[in-house]
Amino acid sequence: MFETDQWAFSGVDGQISLHKWQKTIDLITGLFSAPSGYIVQATSKGYRVVIRSNEGGSNFETNSILPPQTPLFCRYVAENNNILYVNDACNNEQWNTMPEVVEDGVQSYLGLPIHWPEGDVFGTLCLKDTKQTSYTDEYFELIEQLRDLIEDDLALIYSFEQMREIAMLDPLTNIYNRRALTLLAQQKLNLALRLGFDVCCLFIDINDFKKLNDTCGHEVGDKALIILANTLKTHLRDADIVGRLGGDEFIAVMQISDKSKLSYIIDKITTEYSKALIKESVCDLSLSIGYSFTDKQKQLFDALLNNADQAMYKNKQAYKQAKKLNNTSSTLNHSDKKASH
């Protein structure tokens, strides 16, 4: 989901035309005969001008970032989530010491909040003038309608991000699906080749998962999958790519600076998964994990994945063989005890 506290645009955003927003601001300043108009984004990091139409010599520059505590008219609008109209700032004790008034000569300010679809404040749409103004109700209605057009565009962005996130995530575990995993992992491999760092692919499979589904039901099986996904997300780094190929097959793609630490990472995943299963009252399960590393040549993610899959399969076979031997030993011991009686 698009986070409303991050900068929405850098240059031209792919989902809407900032040229369209520029035309909107140019139209507003023309209709209001105002020398300066702005769309300003407000976040906890500060205030940034996204679009401006400026003929009045303001010190603002498009995409400049002003600290969150900067005394600004638009800060008041964003923090109070309300329209602000000051038609004669120089003769208003509340506003006549504002830097925009003292340094830029702003005499009139009209600003109103722009909202994301869920109601959070995106920023402000504002007009500044170096002379006193007397806007009528018709002007307020007009600027509100133009603000609504901007909010419609934000709704499109928000909806697109929702759809893109849904398309990239596995619906059960809420981690990346195979399509997203392949795309993101290949990007990491390409970056690794350029910058010279190593990438490791973990192929993770739950032992006896089919037996769990058959004996305890798919609801318990789904719970085991969700717990594994959460374990990987919790105990791997944010920069690591975690995804589900399907069934009980999970993948983690990690940048590795010290290959000797890999065994610790694998042990950590296995141990924490077991703890989480017990905590959630799911029968204890083990994992078969295989891994592969990138070489120093251009490599497709499918090749890295295949190598990790083969390594996992060997570990899976070793697990099955050990389990078979253990069951045989248990049976023999049980037979010996019966014979002694």
Image: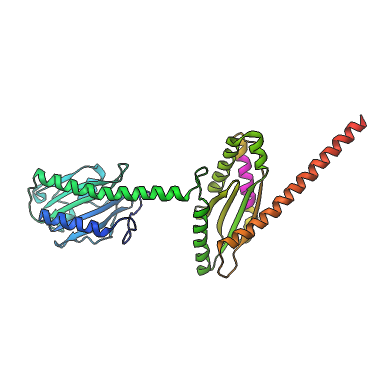
- Position of residue 237 measured from the top left corner of the image (x, y, whole percent): 52, 52
- Position of residue 318 measured from the top left corner of the image (x, y, whole percent): 74, 51
What residue lies at 62% left-to-right and 50% top-to-bottom? Answer: 204
Q: Is residue 53 magenta?
A: no
- Position of residue 76 measured from the top left corner of the image (x, y, whole percent): 22, 46
- Position of residue 156 measured from the top left corner of the image (x, y, whole percent): 32, 49
Q: Nearer the viewer, residue 104 or 158?
A: 158
User: Is residue 339 depicted above or below 65 in this figure?
Assistant: above
Q: Nearer the viewer, residue 227 or 91?
A: 227
Q: Which residues are magenta?
A: 265-275
**From this viewpoint, is residue 4 visible?**
no
User: Is residue 180 depicted above or below 271 in this figure?
Assistant: below
User: Is residue 292 depicted above or below 229 in this figure?
Assistant: below
User: Is residue 55 depicted above or below 139 in this figure?
Assistant: below
Q: Is residue 266 magenta?
A: yes
Could you tell me what secondary structure mostly forms the magenta stretch? helix
The quarter in which the C terminus is drawn is top right
Residue with the most extreme front position: 214
Left or right: 235 as drawn, with respect to 2:
right
Q: Nearer the viewer, residue 88 or 222?
A: 222
**From this viewpoint, is residue 125 visible?**
yes
What residue lies at 62% left-to-right and 40% top-to-bottom? Answer: 275
